[in-house]
Image (cartoon, grey):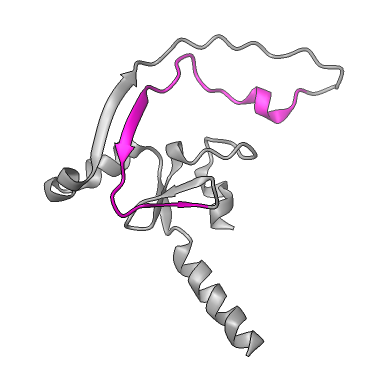
Amino acid sequence: MKSYIKSFLRKIQKSYTPQGFYPTIGDWWNQLCDRQRKSNGLIQNIYPPQTLCRKAPKTIDSELYWKFTLDYGTLSRPAYLASVEGGRFCKGVAVITPDNYLLSDASIHMKIDPNNPEKHPIFH
């Protein structure tokens, strides 16, 4: 009985693992047909991009921590509001579309490089 339950739970977990990812909500929105766009919502540019001024912190270590070496560019991404009808929120860190893809820019996880969404914990 226990092995049946474990097998069942693995199947459920596998079906909830995303098949891939959209780098941005805009990428997801652009592939929707007009009918789907009517049932979902996207309001772009609530706040425009902001200029970023980041300096490397001082450290007593010989090397800088890897997160401080990431290039986030000189502008922040614009803020937006999106409604994903039929989507889901998983494990407190992942927004999944109805077609079972991770919305990468809406699924930030602090322990991974945001430029590598395939390393998101939802895939492991």
Q: Which residue is drawn at 38% across and 58% down?
A: 100
Foreground pick, 74 / 15: 15
Foreground pick, 76 / 46: 46
Residue range in magenta is 64-90
In the rendered image, the quadrant that contains the C terminus is bottom right
Whole-percent x, y for residue 101 in the image? 39, 53
Q: In this view, does 76 lie above or below 82?
A: above
Whole-percent x, y for residue 7 in the image? 57, 81
Q: In this view, does 101 lie above or below 47?
A: below
Q: Is residue 56 above or below residue 112?
A: above
Q: In this view, does 46 lie to the left or right of 15?
A: left
Q: Quadrant of residue 37?
A: top left
Q: Residue at x 34, y 38 (%)?
A: 25
In the rendered image, the quadrant that contains the N terminus is bottom right
Whole-percent x, y for residue 15 in the image? 45, 68
Whole-percent x, y for residue 54 in the image? 60, 12
Q: In this view, does 112 lie to the left or right of 18?
A: right
Which residue ends up furthest to the left in the rendered image? 34
Foreground pick, 38 / 62: 38
Residue 82 magenta-highlighted:
yes
Residue 80 magenta-highlighted:
yes
Q: How many labels does the image show?
A: 0
Q: Which residue is drawn at 51% across and 75% down?
A: 11
Q: In this view, does 117 lie above or below 62?
A: below
